[in-house]
Amino acid sequence: MAPSPIRILGLDPGLRRTGWGVIEAAGTRLAFIACGTVMPPEEGGLAERLACLHTELMQVLRTYAPDEAAVEETFVNVNPASTLKLGQARGVVMLTPALAGVPVSEYAALLVKKTVVGAGRAEKAQIRLMMKILLPQADFRTDDAADALAVAVTHAQHRGMAAMKAQMAARVATKVAAR
């Protein structure tokens, strides 16, 4: 019996550019659905930019109805003010799907790169190349959208492993109980 497909929204948060990507995963099979980049107007104040980010992500959620969301963890900058602003954008990126009832998982950038490319220090070009290999129909136009797809793929791979571990544990428990 083939597993039911699950729709995953991957998010790469940023205040200037937030990438998003939607895939469907059924077992180890992945299918590209859509991707894009939210770019709040730079001339607005912080509150307006965060509101724009929320509004546009809500539209993505309404349009593509993901079952789960995955967000890349924030890389800490040297500049504390920049890190704080990025954290605020990340908060909106995590809150928006949560408010819509979509479970949100988080993944470190190194894990995303290792999962997708095989090396934790992979460069943007390597991620773009792997996204084209794993999702040949993907039509991302920015590194942010490619990164968001990589986050979604990472979630698909890791949620699948967690499900397999749970199934194996259940089988072992059943065998132990039968003794």
Image: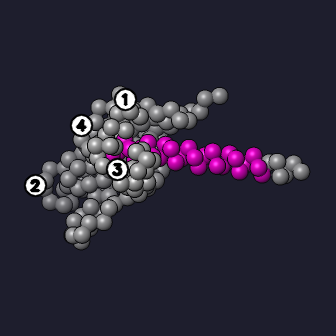
Q: Residue at x 35, y 54 (%)?
A: 121
The residue under the point 57% across, 46% down is 161
Identify the element where label 4 is drawn: loop
Q: Please say whether residue 169 is one of the residues in the magenta stretch.
A: yes
Of labels 2 and 3, the one closer to you: 3
Q: Which residue is mark 3?
A: 122
Location of residue 83 in the rendering, given as x and y in whole percent from the top left corner: 26, 66
Element type at marker 2? loop
- Residue 33 in view here: no
Q: Amino acid at mark 3?
A: Ala
Label 2 close to label 3 by CB (< 8 Å): no
- Give amino acid for label 4: Arg
| Tag shown at residue 141 | 4
Mark 2 to mark 3 CA distance (whole Å): 33 Å
Which residue does the numbered mark 1 point to in the structure image?
136
Q: Nearer the viewer, mark 1 or mark 4?
A: 1
Q: Give the residue drawn at x 26%, y 66%.
A: 77
Q: Earlier in the sequence, mark 1 or mark 2?
A: 2
